[in-house]
Image (cartoon, helix red, strand yellow):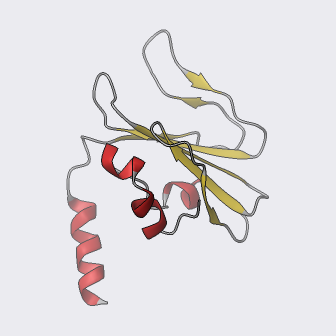
Amino acid sequence: MKKIIILLAIAMLLPMSAFAATDNATAGSRLQLDTEAPTLNIAASPGVFMYYADDATTDPQWYVIGTVHQGGTRFYGTAQNSTTIFYQEATGPKVIGDLTGLTWPSTAAETISEDWWSGTGWTR
């Protein structure tokens, strides 16, 4: 258990500049994916938190997106190269940290790997 905690601490200290992630912070608000004009916004239904991440390049080669409803019972996620919507069971009232705190793919190979999704708590 000590090794896992130490590895997690080290992973948190590594630079994350190659990985762009954003969320809508407030349930029901728009998810803004670009800050330069014209901006790209994705509308959310009332009560829905949204999460988006990509490889942080000028022309992203992959992305993941996830959602959860404040009153819902599941987190949902998918990627650009997947035809599957994956889910995880959710309990209690949801806040944005519950969604952003999940384990998300960080490479194109992970986004398409069924083994990666199922090995990190996601169900097809």
Image location (x, y in percent) of residue 71: 79, 58
| Residue at 47 percent of width and 36 percent of height | 80
Q: In the rendered image, which quarter contains the C terminus?
A: bottom right
Name the residue nearer the viewer: 52 or 25.
Answer: 52
Name the residue nearer the viewer: 50 or 116.
Answer: 116
Q: Which residue is the extreme one toward the bottom?
A: 1
Image location (x, y in percent) of residue 25: 58, 44
| Residue at 46 percent of width and 60 percent of height | 117
Indicate the quadrant where residue 36 lies.
Answer: top left
Residue 31 placement, left or right of 20 = right
| Residue at 43 percent of width and 69 percent of height | 119
Image location (x, y in percent) of residue 45: 76, 37
Residue 107 placement, left or right of 24 = left
| Residue at 26 percent of width and 71 percent of height | 9
Name the residue nearer the viewer: 121 or 45.
Answer: 121
Image location (x, y in percent) of residue 78: 54, 46
Residue 8 placement, left or right of 117 = left
- Looking at the image, can residue 116 be seen? yes
Name the residue nearer the viewer: 67 or 94.
Answer: 67
Q: In the rendered image, which quarter contains the N terminus?
A: bottom left
Give the tally of numbered discs: 0
- Looking at the image, can residue 94 be seen? no
Q: Is 119 situated above or below 27?
A: below
Residue 96 placement, left or right of 110 = right
